[in-house]
């Protein structure tokens, strides 16, 4: 019986350690949804949403980066974004783009590592795809 | 009446009829529960009619989709006159309403099977089960798929081109079958609690749980394939809420399977199994709530917009949480408990440990998926990315691999540590050898080294056990162990393909080779659309003196103008080469060709090359000459022999000019040695001159076509698919064996007259 109790304690401790580890991972991986002003404060990964400013997107062959600008209709602000990765299939037609990344003060851009693209409302209810 | 006049009655009436029949079935079964045995036949009939009514409603929707009856809003939204017939099926489940209907259809048909196999527990099982499908039915009553539009549009909006894929035809219905199956163990568990018959449900529910595990696993496999091979998401799994919504119930299904096994063989785990059956079904409802209610709209993904059913989904969750809660609280002390007296190194103890580990994984993934809700109280709610899931699941995977490696050597009574270690020596040597190779190649991170060692160890020990069992008791007895082998395989695949992939972005100018790692890539040409085959890029890949061609696709959808990209994947034994197009720039020559006129023998210097018109070529024509052919209305084609001289070397090309007497002209450009292109755009019969369009010959502001690619090497990614195949094959073996046993059991029971 002694050993049994001992294993339960060990299991409990392991679970607690894992819970703490999960919570820490959760906090560090969390990307809060913020407005552009808050995004510009930098320091951590955030996510912002907005409409693509028409004609603002360009792909840079040399660096392999996609540059574009998002426009927040509520605040009227804009935010330049650069993205490293595959360009989403319906990027130009998106009604809304969510970019997840960290603000890079040097270039004044949000360095996104993930984009979520929402299809036009014509396909409302259908699909929105995720790219990471 | 106004509301009714807006409905397409051949579809709406069966749905209403189904409501009546389902209520009648629940009422009938509740009479049986109160001891009125004569109501059983009535209840069965009511349920059968309910299932028929749903099947009829589904049939009407399919017929209307195929007929392209755009009066019906749902048909208008997801179908179109140009949509091929097999995509009309995809249109069935492309929208919210249709996907609930297909779910309900499978649910109601599965109920017919449950009715037959529930045995003595039929009445309470079917009463609960019918309640679960009624939850879906009421969603359809509220969100009727047969709502008609005020007027009949001539054309539908068509199916989202991203969904026009063969996988879309097959993947969702299988997924919804898996969802529907998750309600069966739940119904059995609740019925067992209700009847206070705690002993028999595990055996009855086991094959259904196994079936759900297989079907949902198949759906997840297909979803991964779809994402990887066609959609070009770069991977098979993105930890996206919709993906997680199918993974979480699957993991709970895995845990429940082992729990039921423990209950059947040792009478243990009873209380936990009720919780697990509830958790599996709740996971399906909760996942549906997360992805369908619009709560994740700002954070997702495949998001469905809010149809106003979130309130109903919350109510459903509350009801199906309240039922098990009430039953468990009132019966908790009665549930017979077999005390846990297993020694540490026994099969029982390890079963508990490993299933709990998997349950923890399911809970952690649930927490991650719920991040936007969990952080909803904060100033800026957020979500967690793949980082979270990968990091948290790494120790879980290592622990699972450790437990799985040892479990084949454990007996129920417990295995002495010394004997265990002795048996582990040989497999450990084999695993160490493989790990050594992995370390030599790339793996350095200590966690990854442990991961590889334990995954290989689990593979080896379980394979050994599977062989022993198959030899001793027939192949059916090896199913579970075989699935564990699959877990070992898939874990190696996960690690190799996600942590050790190498991705390079490269931009290739047409015709100019570029070194990428140990390969030389050349963008050779753009292949225009041919029939159903979309525009493709041809990329020559040279490696170690061997060459092959890859054909990634990048095309604009005709109707929506969306740019679509499909990767091309070259699979070899040890890795996949994943070539995904990012951007295509046709170059300036396509837009602005240089047009020149040359007489026979005349030359022109363009961008360092000499272009000489050598003369017309009419040899391709019949003996009676081109004029006769022209008179007959046939197409005439005239070749222009053009010599291209560069660096003292001359090569002849023969662009062709084709025309008919009606004036239809085709001038297909052909490519030139050394890059660029040429087309004949006119011939002047009077002065014997030819008009040529030259593409990309001049330097300076004329740019060649450029293709930007993402080239990723994904080592051992095949193991992910193979591992899942083996896991599912093991499950299939077990199901086959179970069904055989059940048949024998029923025969014995029938012979002794106690069905």
Image: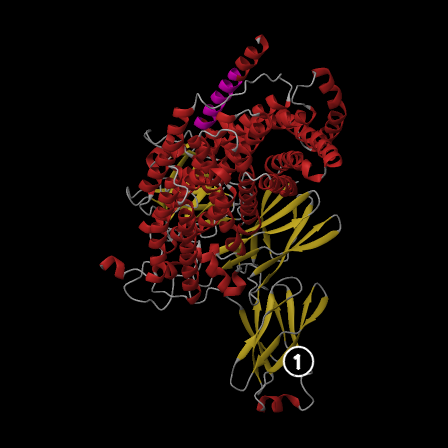
Q: In which quarter of the image is the C terminus of chain B?
A: top right
Q: Is residue A105 visible?
A: no
Residue A1 colored in magenta in the image: no
Q: Can residue B180 be seen in this view?
A: yes
Residue identified by numbered label 1:
B615
Q: Residue extending furthest top?
A: A2
The percent position of residue B49, horizontal first and vertical second, equals 41, 53
The percent position of residue B597, horizontal first and vertical second, equals 57, 77
What is the count of numbered marks?
A: 1
Q: How crowded is mark 1: few (under 14 residues within 10 Å), some or many (20 or more)?
A: some
The percent position of residue B141, horizontal first and vertical second, equals 33, 51
Residue at 45% from the left image edge and 47% from the top image edge: B107
Of B195 and B491, nearer the camera is B195
- Chain ID for label 1? B
Residue A15 colored in magenta in the image: yes
Q: Quadrant of the N terminus of chain B?
A: bottom left
Q: Relative to B706, does residue B716 appear above or below in the rendering?
A: above
Q: Residue extending furthest left?
A: B1
Of A116 and B255, nearer the camera is B255
The percent position of residue B58, horizontal first and vertical second, equals 42, 57
Q: What range of the chain is rendered magenta?
A: A12-27
Q: Quadrant of residue B296?
A: top left
B353 vs B8, left or right, is right
Q: Is mark 1 on a helix, strand or loop?
A: strand
């Amino acid at each position: 019986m002694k050993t049994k109790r001992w294993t339960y304690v060990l299991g409990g401790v392991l679970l607690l350690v894992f819970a703490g580890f999960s919570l820490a991972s959760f906090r560090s991986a969390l990307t809060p949804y913020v407005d552009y002003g808050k995004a510009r404060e930098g320091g951590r990964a955030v996510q912002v949403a907005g409409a693509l400013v028409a004609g603002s997107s360009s792909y840079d062959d040399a660096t392999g980066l996609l540059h574009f600008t998002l426009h927040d209709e509520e605040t009227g602000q804009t935010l330049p974004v650069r993205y490293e990765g595959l360009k989403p299939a319906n990027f130009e037609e998106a009604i809304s783009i969510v970019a997840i990344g960290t603000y890079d003060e040097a270039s004044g851009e949000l360095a996104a590592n993930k984009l979520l693209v929402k299809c036009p409302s014509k396909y409302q209810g259908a699909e929105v795809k995720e790219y990471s | 009446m106004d509301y009714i006049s807006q409905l397409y009655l051949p579809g709406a009436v069966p749905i209403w009829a189904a409501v009546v029949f389902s209520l009648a079935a629940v009422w009938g079964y509740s009479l049986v529960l109160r001891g009125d045995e004569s109501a059983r036949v009535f209840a069965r009939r009511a349920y059968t009619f309910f299932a028929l009514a749903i099947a009829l409603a589904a049939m009407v929707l399919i017929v209307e989709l195929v007929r392209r009856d755009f009066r019906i809003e749902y048909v208008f939204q997801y179908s179109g006159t140009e949509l091929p017939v097999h995509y009309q099926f995809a249109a069935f489940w492309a929208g919210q309403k249709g996907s609930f209907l297909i779910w309900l259809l499978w649910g109601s048909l599965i109920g017919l099977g449950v009715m037959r196999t529930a045995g003595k527990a039929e009445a309470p099982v079917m009463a609960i089960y019918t309640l679960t499908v009624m939850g879906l039915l009421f969603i359809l009553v509220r969100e009727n798929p047969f709502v008609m539009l005020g007027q009949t549009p001539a054309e539908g909006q068509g199916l989202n081109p991203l969904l026009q894929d063969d996988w879309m035809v097959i993947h969702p219905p299988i997924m919804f079958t898996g969802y529907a199956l998750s309600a069966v163990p739940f119904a059995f568990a609740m019925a067992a609690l209700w009847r206070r018959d705690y002993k028999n449900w595990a055996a009855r529910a086991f094959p259904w749980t196994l079936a759900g595990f297989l079907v949902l696993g198949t759906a997840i496999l297909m979803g991964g394939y779809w994402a990887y091979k066609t959609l070009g998401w770069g991977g098979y799994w993105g930890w996206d809420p919709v993906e997680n919504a199918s993974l979480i119930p699957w993991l709970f299904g895995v845990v429940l399977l082992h729990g039921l096994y423990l209950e059947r063989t040792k009478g243990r785990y009873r209380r936990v199994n009720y919780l697990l059956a509830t958790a599996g079904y709740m996971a399906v409802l909760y996942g549906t709530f997360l992805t369908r209610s619009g709560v994740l709209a700002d954070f997702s993904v495949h998001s469905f917009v809010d149809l106003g059913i979130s309130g109903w989904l919350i109510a459903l969750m509350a009801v199906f949480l309240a039922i098990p809660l009430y039953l468990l609280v009132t019966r908790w002390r009665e549930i017979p408990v077999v005390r846990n007296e297993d020694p540490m190194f026994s099969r029982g103890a390890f079963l508990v440990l490993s299933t709990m580990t998997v349950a923890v994984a399911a809970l952690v993934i649930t927490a991650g998926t719920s991040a936007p809700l969990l952080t909803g109280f904060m100033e800026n709610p957020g979500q967690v990315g793949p980082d979270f899931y990968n990091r948290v699941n790494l120790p879980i995977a290592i622990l699972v691999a450790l437990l799985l490696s040892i479990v084949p050597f454990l007996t129920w009574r417990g295995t002495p540590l010394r004997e265990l270690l002795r048996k582990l020596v040989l497999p450990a040597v084999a695993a160490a050898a493989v790990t050594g190779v992995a370390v030599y190649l790339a793996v350095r991170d200590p966690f990854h080294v442990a991961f590889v060692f334990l995954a290989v160890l689990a593979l080896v020990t379980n394979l050994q056990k599977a062989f022993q069992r198959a030899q001793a008791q027939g192949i059916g007895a090896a199913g579970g162990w075989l699935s564990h082998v699959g877990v070992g395989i898939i874990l190696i695949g996960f690690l190799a393909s996600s942590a050790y992939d190498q991705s390079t972005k490269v931009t290739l100018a047409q015709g100019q080779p570029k070194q990428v790692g140990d390969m030389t890539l050349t963008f050779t040409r753009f292949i225009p659309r041919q029939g159903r085959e979309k525009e493709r890029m041809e990329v020559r890949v040279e490696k170690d003196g061997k060459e092959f061609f890859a054909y990634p696709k990048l095309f604009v959808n005709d109707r929506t103008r969306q740019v679509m990209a499909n990767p091309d994947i070259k699979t070899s034994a040890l890795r996949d080469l994943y070539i995904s197009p990012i951007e295509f720039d046709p170059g300036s020559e396509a837009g602005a060709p240089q047009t020149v006129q040359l007489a026979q023998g005349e030359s022109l210097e363009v961008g360092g090359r000499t272009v000489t018109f050598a003369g017309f070529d009419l040899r391709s024509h019949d003996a009676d000459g081109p004029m006769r052919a022209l008179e007959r209305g046939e197409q005439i084609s005239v070749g222009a022999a053009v010599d291209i001289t560069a660096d003292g070397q001359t090569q002849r090309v023969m662009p062709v000019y084709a025309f008919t007497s009606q004036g239809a002209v085709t001038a297909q450009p052909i490519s030139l040695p050394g890059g660029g292109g040429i087309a004949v755009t006119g011939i002047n019969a009077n002065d014997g001159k030819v008009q040529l369009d030259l593409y990309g010959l001049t330097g300076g502001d004329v740019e060649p076509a450029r293709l930007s690619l993402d080239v990723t090497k994904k080592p051992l990614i095949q193991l992910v698919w193979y591992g899942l195949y083996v896991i599912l094959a093991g499950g299939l073996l077990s199901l086959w064996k179970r069904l055989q046993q059940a048949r024998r059991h029923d025969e014995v029971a029938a012979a002794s007259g106690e069905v």
